[in-house]
Image (spheres, rainbow, N blue to C red):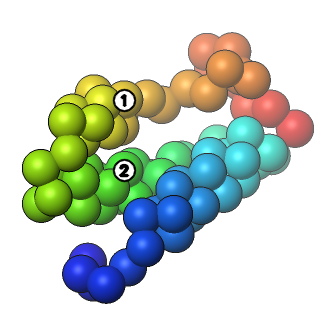
Amino acid sequence: MEAHMDLNQFYFQHQISLMRAAGATSEPTRMKHLNVAEVVSEQIFDFLTSRGAAASASWIAGSDQRCLPTCSAGSVSA
């Protein structure tokens, strides 16, 4: 993680990954994008924690979510 990276860039990357996961047409592609989102959420957590931000805890609590609201268990949204 680069120390000079803007927090908004982290949020942007996270949101893009979630949108790509929601639009994935296959489970492997969906999982790839969710994994990227998880890595970015860990970077957000590290970034916020290093600055003493109380909001950092919420990034780890939700980082392992594997199903987006737009999909049902075992299916992939098109």
* Earlier-in-chain disc, 2 versus 1: 2
Secondary structure type for disc 2: helix
Amino acid beneath label 1: Gly
Instruction: Report the amino acid beneath label 2.
Output: Ser
Q: Nearer the viewer, residue 70 or 60?
A: 60
Numbered circle sitting on residue 22: none
Residue 31: x %, y % from top left: 54, 47
Query: Which of the 4 image quarters holds residue 12?
Result: bottom right
Classify residue 50 as left or right of residue 77: left
Between 21 and 60, the one lying in front of the other is 60
Q: Report the quarter where the N terminus lies.
A: bottom left
59 to 50, vertically: above or below: above
Is the Cβ of the residue at disc 2 closer than 8 Å to that at disc 1?
A: yes
Name the residue that disc number 2 marks. 41
Q: Position of residue 54 (x, y in %)?
A: 19, 36
Q: Which numbered dot is residue 62?
A: 1
